[in-house]
Amino acid sequence: MKKTILLLFLCCSFCLLGQELQSPSAFLGYKLGSQFTRHHRVVDYYEYLAKSAPEQVILEEYGKTNEGRRLLLAYVSSSDNIKNLENIRKEHLKSTEGQGTADKAIVWLSYNVHGNESVSTEASMQTIYDLLTSKKEYLENTVVIMDPCINPDGRDRYVNWYRQYKNSPYNADPNSKEHREGWWSGRSNHYMFDLNRDWAWLTQVESQQRLPMYNQWMPHIHVDFHEQSLNSPYYFAPAAEPYHEVITDFQRDFQETIGKNHALYFDREGWFYFTKERFDLFYPSYGDTYPTYNGAIGMTYEQGGSGRAGLGVITASGDTLTLKDRIEHHRTTGLSTVEMGAKHANRLNVEFRKFYSSKNYKYKSYVLNGSEDKIKSLTNLLDKHQIEYGFGSASTVKGFRYQTGKNGAMSLNDKSLVISSNQKKGTLVKVLFEPDARLSDSLTYDITAWSLPYAYGLEALASTAVISTKNTNPYKEEQITNSIVDGAYAYLSSWNSMADGRFLADLLKEGVRVRYARKPFRLEGKKYERGTLIITRADNANKSGFMEILRKLRKKHNRSLDRVSTGFVDSGKDFGSRDVQLIPDIKVGVIMGDPVTTLRYGEVWHFMEQQLGFPFSALDADYINNINLDDYNILVLPDGSSYRSLMGNGFLKKLKSWVSRGGKLIAMGRAVGSLEGEDGFGISSKEVDFKTDKEEVQAFEDSPRERMKNQITGAIFKAKVDTTNPLAYGYEDTYYTLKLGADAYEYLNSGTAVYLDGDTKPVAGFAGSEAQKKLDKTLIFGVENRGRGQVVYLVDNPLFRGFWENGKLFFANALFMVN
């Protein structure tokens, strides 16, 4: 009987193995490229492959999106490699220590980071099928890791929209609705963030869950599959200048090697393509640069089409570009990439070990001083990147001082954070921490400055010496142990970080009444600064469970509360003074839809929900004129390009009346400009009369570089701060602002909080010579009082991509402290 069961088992197993794998078209029930595949069906196909070919495919779920969709990795290789997969991984990681004898190529293919660049997930299914069937020889010495969809929420948003609006079978007319997405396209994730700008900053759950998986493998090659404008030919490596100076000769050369192999296939088919244009390797948070700074050959591949292409569309040349065409192009470069990985596995391993050998970077150590909350926030990011750090001891170090822009000295203590570039992630350390990344070409695809000491508001020094450190972390999370005793007159808490902002937000949501100090004061032997939170027993006498709530939130946020027995201060203003103000009940509305930019709305949305934790109402511009604004006491206008049409429709007049009655308007970026003019508020653009020499003929090809003279491409400027302004509570007298454009505004008549005065040269990044001339004596952040209300102007964006940590308290101040 046992022999019979064994024989049946072997026969069944043989039959299963003998069955041919189903192609995507056969499995899905329609020809691939004839319709878009929803995410759950993509998952079904990958699960089918893992079940049908377990000797060659392992499928791993590494997380879920905000909307609950699964994030997957497929490991694809030969049966021998799959059996030995963990040993291959461990041996490969020895290369990051300059050791080991790894001989397998590790190739990672990432698809659909932008949801409406939807061809790549379709192409991934054909690619993995071909690797398992017609291209199996590539897998003998190669492990391929495939992420079929980095952004499932955005992809399904696009696919569902397209299925709703398309003609049957489709309409190739580019003017047809199926080629014209609405305001919220499928490009971004749930919070309208661009996941291809989040690799380094890790603000989004998709990035946070993906990076640990990436660090477990550290591939030799990483490809990020994209789509670009409808009429563009295919783009593949090598990349355009500027290249960051840390990129090695081998990394440059191997991009050329891969690109030439792609070209062989494209030439054979007569397909058009371009290289070395537009897509550079500089900004560190892309899906090509971040892997590059971790030793990989990081590349972007761009197919023409994106959300405009649908199933088929007529291009400017009169040809019809179909989804099937786009799939075939991405399939070709994907397979060509794996082919080159397999062919050059030995060379990739040798050069990867070289990348992780000792680097002789100019700055060996980066030293940072600052508040506990800011240091903790930064070390949390470093931990996610597996960047090592230590802490100093009482001493003085010399080097480049970020705050002065000159060489000098800085004092260290046991709470000083020290990060060495002499470590496994040393190249990434240099890129993220260097004072000013060297730019070889001003024509760049993104911002040109991001130095983390400026972004986190920390005093910093870059030293050419290796500074010894201690591993004992003085900021290790420890719950504050002193108990809150009943019967105090008031409890006091600091106000200088987003941790304080989250504590306040939770207090207000629980209905606890909180005051704040508008003047410094001294009480019971301790000095308190502007913005100090004052929670009195009298204000909360009728609040049920007041002390329990206070204890709970103090523990949750690990805040230190000072118990005081009187409101009679030693110096400053007593707690009954009008300079100790009660924070009113707050109801926030945020404008969305046209004219707001989706990415900028998403930053406010994510800040309010995920970073601050405070409720708001999303108010669509389509019906904003039908809303009673008095239902809200704060209204936020995120950055957008077409506010003037909204304002010209009677909304500006409505806003002015609402502000005069006590409303608070927060205008960000280009929304600021929509408020100026005779019928607007008290903001006005800075006008500069430039002289031009028209006698000299300018070459046509030089026009883009000439235009750069008037542009600012994400540069950092040193600004002055009026610390007495409620918008600046918690800040010192200097703030480093990330300026994303050349818009400039005059000082306010009263209420200028952060401003440029004098030196308009950026401390890091590119700013055109003509653009710099406009910036002297210009507003960055300010408050205008109008009737019983206020207008808060945020010319620069303190919430940009969620990573400019030191700017976020300005937005919290705008919500809570400006009254």
Image: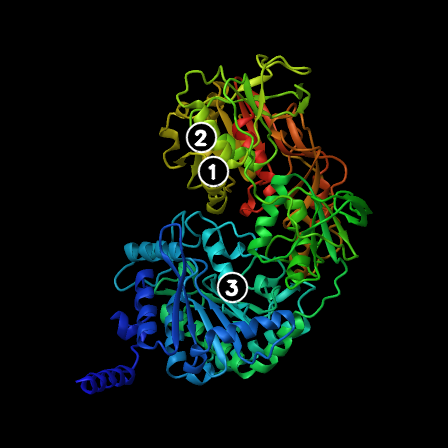
Q: At 66% across and 69% down in the image, what residue appears?
A: 356
Asked if one can make out residue 271 in the rendered structure from this viewpoint, the answer is: yes
- Name the quarter where the C terminus is drawn: top right
The residue under label 2 is: 588
Q: Which mark is residue 214?
A: 3
Q: Which mark is residue 224?
A: none
How far apart are the two marked residues, 3 and 1, measured between alpha carbons? 29 Å
Dividing the image into 4 quarters, which one contains the N terminus? bottom left
x 67%, y 36%: residue: 687
Q: With respect to residue 602, does 302 lie above or below?
A: below
Could you say which is closer to the camera, residue 523 or residue 757? 523
Task: Check disc 2: other Cα within 10 Å, few if <14, some if 14-19, many if 20+.
Answer: many
Residue identifier under label 1: 608
* Position of residue 93 measured from the top left corner of the image (x, y, whole percent): 57, 70
Sooner in the amino-acid sequence: mark 1 or mark 2: 2
Q: Is residue 536 left or right of residue 626?
A: right
Residue at image location 56% in from the left, 26% down from the top:
817
